[in-house]
Image: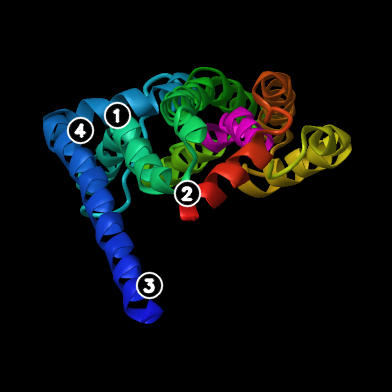
Amino acid sequence: MAAPGGEETFISHLVELRERLLRAVAAVVVVFVCLMPFAGQIYDLLAQPMIQTLPQGTRMIATGVVTPFFVPVKVTLMVAFVFALPVVLYQAWAFVAPGLYAHEKQLVLPLVFASTVLFILGMAFCYFFVFNTVFRFIAEFAPKSITPAPDIEQYLAFVMTMFVAFGVTFEVPVIVVVLARFGIVPLQKMREARPYVIVGAFVVAAVVTPPDVMSQVLLAVPLCLLFEVGLIVARFVKPKAGEAAANDAATSLTER
């Protein structure tokens, strides 16, 4: 008798997951359609850090026939995803919320807001500071006998990788707070893991960034600092003593 009920619950979860995904995709599509008329201007804005470091009169190139069309479209889709990120994150949290306790559900909106703001801050830090620093470093290091003419498709792949890397890096405080608040990893254990985090930060930076020291340092150092910020914030939101036991007791009474 238990199998049909379990199967029905599983199917209902799949249906809800599909609805949440459709809502998230719909939000991205609506923003994307609204931004499409400005696709060219959006790409020009994205390319500005690179253009500023090129020699006077030099432009970026497109080697593919349809590249001048598809690259701005991809950039616009990325921007649409960023604008719709609050809706996407809310749908994700709304899907897992029924499995949380009441006091845990109170953290959903603050976590969604913090995750959105931190991801956008990570991208802004990358655009306004990292790109200018890295591109100027490369331009000064390059031989004077060459004229750089970056391909727009390769440039897009580079900036998207960097945006994702720094956006996820800026989510570290949220991850630390969630691990501590839900008791997944004790706060003391995370403090003791500092040396491993520092080494891991530089390893991750070496993998996801270009092979220049400047960009690796600019990713690894903020990652370490944001981990420390997460530890500080986690001190004020860590689980209270006896809270887990109270939750277990309440759940047991409800089942009876």
The image quadrant that residue 179 belongs to is top right
Q: Between disc 2 and disc 4, whose residue precedes?
A: 4
Mark 2: give few (<14), some (14-19) or many (20+) Cα within 10 Å: few
Q: Are marks 2 and 3 in contact (CB under 8 Å)?
A: no
Q: Position of residue 24 (x, y in %)?
A: 26, 44
Q: Secondary structure at mark 1?
A: helix
Mark 4: give few (<14), some (14-19) or many (20+) Cα within 10 Å: many
Spatial separation of the CA atoms under disc 3 and disc 1:
38 Å
Q: Is residue 68 visible?
A: no
Mark 3: give few (<14), some (14-19) or many (20+) Cα within 10 Å: few
Q: Is residue 203 visible?
A: yes
Q: Position of residue 209 (x, y in %)?
A: 62, 42
Residue hosting label 4: 39
As drawn, the label of residue 83 is 1
Spatial separation of the CA atoms under disc 2 and disc 1:
41 Å
Q: Name the residue type under label 1.
A: Phe
In the rendered structure, does residue 173 fall within the stretch colored magenta? yes
Q: Nearer the viewer, mark 4 or mark 1?
A: 1
| Magenta highlight range | 166-182
Q: Name the residue type under label 3.
A: Gly
Residue hosting label 3: 6
The residue sitting at 70% across, 36% down in the picture is 216
Residue reaching furthest to the front: 256
The N terminus lies in quadrant: bottom left
Q: Name the residue type under label 2.
A: Thr
Q: Secondary structure at mark 2?
A: helix
Q: Position of residue 176 (x, y in %)?
A: 66, 34
Q: Between disc 4 and disc 1, whose residue precedes?
A: 4
Q: Secondary structure at mark 4?
A: helix
